[in-house]
Image: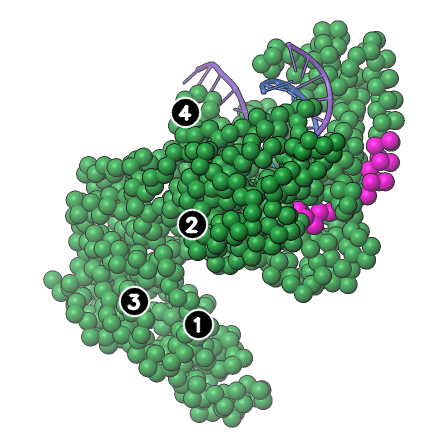
Chain colours: A green, B blue, C purple
DNA sequence: GTACTCACG
DNA sequence: GACGTACGTGAGTACG
């Protein structure tokens, strides 16, 4: 039967589907061979969902998926700038294009494309044919360029927003009916397609003009009647350009197509054909789902075995006797020349301290081929036989400056890749000698990108695991504890095998890990989020932040006095003296001697005396209340006001933390020695410690922090429209949540209801449980569970996200961030309580990790962005960056840095929620908040 | 070296 | 139906 009345044609804008899928998903790759398939996966899911959603009485009788073919169309002949501002197709998308055609055919859908025409023109032609035949047509696309086709049985459907667009929708978008859309577009132009239009005229003005003059030809003919002088002149001056624009946006309804409407009749997919395609792509979940739905057996998809990886390079066994000690310039130059010829070299530095700010360079090792390594001793001391043997330089070392003069050009050579394990350390040490090491690869970060969540990434652990070799222990050389010596006191003959081995091992890691990046699909993660951070963090750490010792010292004294007073009171109340700082002794006093309620806990059979328990007791008794006060002061004093003083570098007067890039599984940084990411802020007393973090005279500290970034990411990932709307309108998100959950209007919100909603919002990010929420809010567990149930009722997308994420983790043993960072979850299928932990971690990791990725991207871009502004980035605290800036450049810095931070996800990920950044400034960190 | 406690996001 | 639970960190202290 020929297409006609009662028939319904679906036309899918296939190319738009592909791009949407590509940008919506992280860069997935096929497990077996690393072929990028993210866009194909998203495309198949969208097609499948569409088929599933169209089974009712309104189901299409005919359907086709339409694609663009080639980039040159008749529009380019009309106007050579047409779509000229389009970015080139991403490299990892190109190979996926033919696969989407295969996918379409596998679903047994007509697959239409035609050289020289855009998909839009083909869609326009079929839509006209359907209309003329008296049937209906639905265009599945959200592209406004196709709105001109709406009417007379032709509608559009936005699959993303799940809404139909008829005449009303077009009127809403363009202010005119479908038949005048072209006129409005011709005037307004289109920056996406690079259609010029009339300068200064947008959709609103265009619609106004068209509605007033009837159509574009009338308008242009009577342009001299326009009252506004500027608008009149624009139209007169650009009449030709406007006519050209109309030609560009007008779709060709008369493409000569090979397939007739009747050829597009819907056919059932062939189960075997479809499943074999999906299995070949290794889409495990979709294959299973489709098989289930079609009542067919799912083909098995082989799990690639890591051992079978064909790339494991053959390497000779590690042999310490083969390493060379370099003690003359000529030999050193030979090694350097070979490294330069090779284009890459593994290296390692030996120093006097783990603290790079004070470390002195003692020696350097190089490795060019596995097994071929050398050690260049530079400043080893001792070994002579006179009285000054201890401090005198050891024999057989190239003069320090001479050696550096040979090494420096190679270390700074753009064409020589320097490979190191934990490169930030070596980069910082060498920076002390005016050497800027670049470019670098870091094997620790390679491992982190590949294996986060599986194990740590230190050299010893990696060597055991991947080389089956235990490196020489440093302790055998320098000892440990009190009798530990510095590396410059180690005899050269002992130091050489150790040092050269490190470079050797590092090069072996590189050979193993680097090729795996592509296979695992984390090349972009490593290249954009890990490696570029090394020099950025090195500079931040070397900058340090100024800390006022006087302020800390005064606070320490004040705390000590208060603590002494509290201690006396506590002993008085207890009726005996004991060590208030000993939880064990305190537990005995509270529970045995005083007989308070609150039983045993802990593996050691000790009473638990945590703050939450003491807080409960404090409502009835004074002693636990005093202990809480004492504990707070004790913590502030020992961890902050006392300890921070010891970290002030005597040369710089500043505190230089160290960030570990590969410390936290989720992609967050961790700060150590000292930890500057947990400086107090929640309590008033603790917050004052931030007053000791100051700017130099004439400068100010600026703190910029992301507002609610994890909740925004959750709203985006889980697709929660209500939350997204609240963020778009700049609402108080916790109040908005409370309003939605408890049906309380925003203006009637009480602080208590808001507080509960806030706890739930945070709980959700952590993988909520009734027990945890109950404990946090101190409410009965049943009540907490009621809140959670209601929350999921109102935001069902959150539950779906949680379930989907856990299911993904169980199947793949990892979860990933929007930027493709993989966090492994090896415990996810464990039995027992471990599974609960792993499940919640799996829910949290993509959210926390995506936030971490975003601020990493901001940090990587920041230095270039603020170039010319006298400012330095000093600290990162997960969602906050702290800068020190010349007073008069503060506003410029805030503007520029905010722009970078707010836009950091782009262009890799387009978030459907706005990201906003709050800024503060002041003479110290407390004021800057 | 491990357990406990508590500071931060 | 019971079990055990908020996610991610680092550091200081007590104690064996």
Q: Disc 2 or 1, which lies upstream in sequence?
A: 1
Residue that label 1 marks: A85
Q: Mark 3 lies on which chain?
A: A
Give the residue at mark 2: A523
Earlier sequence position, callout 4 versus callout 2: 2
Viewer-proximal residue, A50 or A454?
A: A454
Q: x%, y% of residue A331?
A: 51, 49
Which mark is nearer the camera, 3 or 1? Answer: 1
Mark 3 and mark 4 on one chain: yes
In the image, residue A868 above or below residue A359 = below
- Percent of width and height locating residue B4: 65, 19
- Crowdedness near tag 4: few (<14), some (14–19) or many (≥20) residues, C-alpha within 10 Å: some
Q: Does the magenta stretch include residue A512?
A: no
Q: Where is residue A657 in the image (x, y as percent from the top left)?
A: 67, 41
Residues packed near mark 2 inside 10 Å, few (<14), some (14 to 19) or many (20 plus): many
Residue under the image location 66 percent in, 46 percent down:
A541
Above or below, A916 against A386 in this view is: below
Query: Which segment did they paint magenta?
Result: A540-558
Marks 3 and 1 sit apart, C-alpha to C-alpha, by: 17 Å
Q: Which chain carries label 4?
A: A
Q: Nearer the viewer, mark 4 or mark 2?
A: 2
Residue A610 vs residue A788, the one in the foreground: A610
């Amino acid at each position: 039967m020929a297409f006609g009345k009662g028939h319904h044609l679906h036309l899918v804008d296939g190319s738009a589907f592909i791009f949407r899928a590509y940008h919506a998903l992280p860069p997935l790759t096929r497990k077996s061979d690393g072929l990028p398939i993210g866009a194909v996966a998203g495309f198949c899911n969208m097609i499948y969902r569409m088929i599933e959603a169209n089974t009712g009485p309104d189901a299409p009788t005919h359907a086709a998926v339409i694609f663009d073919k080639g980039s040159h169309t008749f529009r380019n002949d009309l106007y050579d700038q047409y779509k000229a501002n389009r970015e080139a197709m991403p490299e990892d998308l190109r190979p996926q294009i033919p696969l989407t055609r295969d996918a379409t055919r596998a679903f047994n859908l007509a697959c239409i494309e035609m050289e020289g025409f855009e998909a839009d023109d083909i869609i326009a032609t079929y839509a006209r044919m359907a209309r003329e035949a008296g049937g209906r047509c639905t265009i599945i696309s959200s592209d406004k360029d196709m709105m001109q086709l709406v009417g007379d049985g032709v509608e559009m459907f936005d699959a993303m927003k799940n809404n139909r667009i008829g005449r009303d929708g077009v009127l809403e978008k363009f202010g005119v009916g479908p038949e005048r859309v072209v006129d409005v577009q011709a005037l307004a132009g289109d920056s996406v397609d690079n259609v010029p239009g009339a300068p200064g005229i947008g959709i609103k003005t265009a619609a106004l003009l068209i509605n007033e003059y009837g159509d574009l030809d009338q308008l242009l003919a009577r342009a001299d009647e326009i009252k506004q002088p500027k608008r009149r002149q624009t139209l007169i001056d650009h009449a030709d350009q406007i006519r050209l624009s109309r030609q560009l946006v007008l779709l060709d309804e008369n493409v000569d197509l090979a397939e007739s409407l009747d050829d597009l009749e819907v056919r059932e997919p062939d189960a075997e054909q479809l499943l074999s395609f999906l299995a070949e792509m290794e889409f495990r979940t979709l294959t299973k789902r489709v098989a289930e739905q079609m009542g067919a057996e799912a083909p098995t998809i082989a799990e690639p075995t890591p051992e079978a990886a064909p790339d494991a390079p053959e390497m000779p066994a590690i042999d310490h006797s083969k390493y060379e000690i370099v003690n003359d310039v000529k030999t050193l130059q030979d090694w350097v020349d070979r490294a330069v010829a090779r284009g890459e070299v593994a290296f390692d530095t030996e120093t006097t301290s783990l603290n790079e700010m004070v470390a002195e360079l003692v020696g350097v090792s190089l490795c060019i081929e596995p097994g071929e390594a050398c050690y260049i001793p530079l400043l080893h001391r001792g070994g002579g036989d006179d009285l000054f043997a201890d401090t005198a330089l050891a024999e057989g070392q190239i003069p320090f400056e001479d050696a550096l003069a040979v090494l420096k050009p190679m270390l700074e050579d753009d064409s020589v890749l320097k490979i190191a394990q934990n490169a930030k350390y070596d980069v910082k040490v060498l920076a002390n000698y005016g050497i800027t090491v670049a470019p670098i690869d870091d094997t620790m970060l390679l491992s982190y990108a590949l294996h986060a969540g599986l194990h740590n990434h230190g050299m010893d652990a990696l060597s055991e695991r991947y080389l089956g070799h235990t490196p020489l222990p440093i302790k055998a050389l320098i000892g440990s504890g009190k009798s530990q010596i510095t590396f410059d006191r180690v005899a050269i003959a002992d130091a050489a095998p150790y040092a050269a081995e490190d470079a050797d091992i590092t090069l072996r890691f590189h050979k193993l890990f680097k090729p795996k990046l592509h296979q695992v699909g984390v090349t972009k993660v490593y290249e954009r989020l890990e490696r570029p951070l090394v020099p950025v963090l090195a500079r931040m750490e070397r900058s340090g932040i100024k800390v006022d010792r006087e302020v800390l010292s005064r606070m320490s004294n004040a705390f000590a006095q208060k603590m002494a007073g509290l201690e006396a009171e506590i002993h008085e109340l207890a009726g005996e003296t004991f060590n208030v700082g000993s939880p064990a002794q305190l537990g005995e006093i509270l529970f045995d001697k005083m007989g308070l309620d609150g039983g045993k806990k802990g593996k050691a059979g000790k009473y638990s005396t945590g703050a939450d328990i003491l807080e409960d007791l404090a409502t009835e008794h004074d002693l636990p209340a005093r202990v809480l006060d004492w504990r707070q002061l004790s913590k502030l004093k020992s961890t902050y006001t006392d300890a921070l003083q010891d970290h002030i570098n005597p040369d710089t007067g500043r505190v230089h933390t160290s960030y570990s890039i590969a410390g936290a599984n989720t992609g967050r940084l961790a700060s150590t020695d000292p930890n500057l990411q947990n400086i107090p802020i929640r309590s008033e007393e603790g917050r004052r410690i931030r007053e000791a973090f100051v700017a130099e005279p004439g400068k100010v500290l600026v703190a910029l922090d992301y507002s609610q970034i994890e909740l925004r990411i959750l709203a985006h990932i889980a697709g929660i429209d209500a939350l997204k709307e609240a963020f778009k309108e700049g609402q108080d998100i916790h109040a908005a949540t409370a309003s939605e959950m408890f049906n309380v209007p925003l203006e009637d919100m009480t602080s208590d209801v808001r507080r509960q909603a806030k706890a739930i919002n945070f709980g959700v990010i952590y993988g909520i449980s009734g027990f945890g929420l109950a404990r946090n809010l101190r409410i009965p567990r049943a009540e907490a569970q009621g809140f959670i149930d209601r929350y999921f009722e109102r935001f069902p997308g959150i539950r779906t996200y949680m379930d989907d994420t856990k299911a993904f983790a169980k199947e793949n043993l990892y979860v990933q961030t929007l930027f493709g960072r993989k966090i492994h979850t090896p415990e996810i299928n464990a039995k027992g309580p471990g599974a609960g932990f792993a499940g919640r971690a799996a829910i949290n990791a993509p959210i926390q990790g995506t936030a971490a990725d975003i601020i990493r991207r901001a940090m990587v871009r920041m230095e270039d962005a603020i170039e010319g502004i006298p400012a330095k980035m000093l600290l990162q605290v997960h969602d906050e960056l702290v800068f020190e800036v010349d007073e008069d450049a503060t506003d410029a810095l805030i503007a520029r840095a905010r722009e970078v931070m707010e836009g950091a996800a782009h262009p890799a990920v387009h978030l459907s929620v706005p990201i906003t950044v709050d800024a503060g400034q002041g003479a110290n960190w407390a004021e800057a908040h």
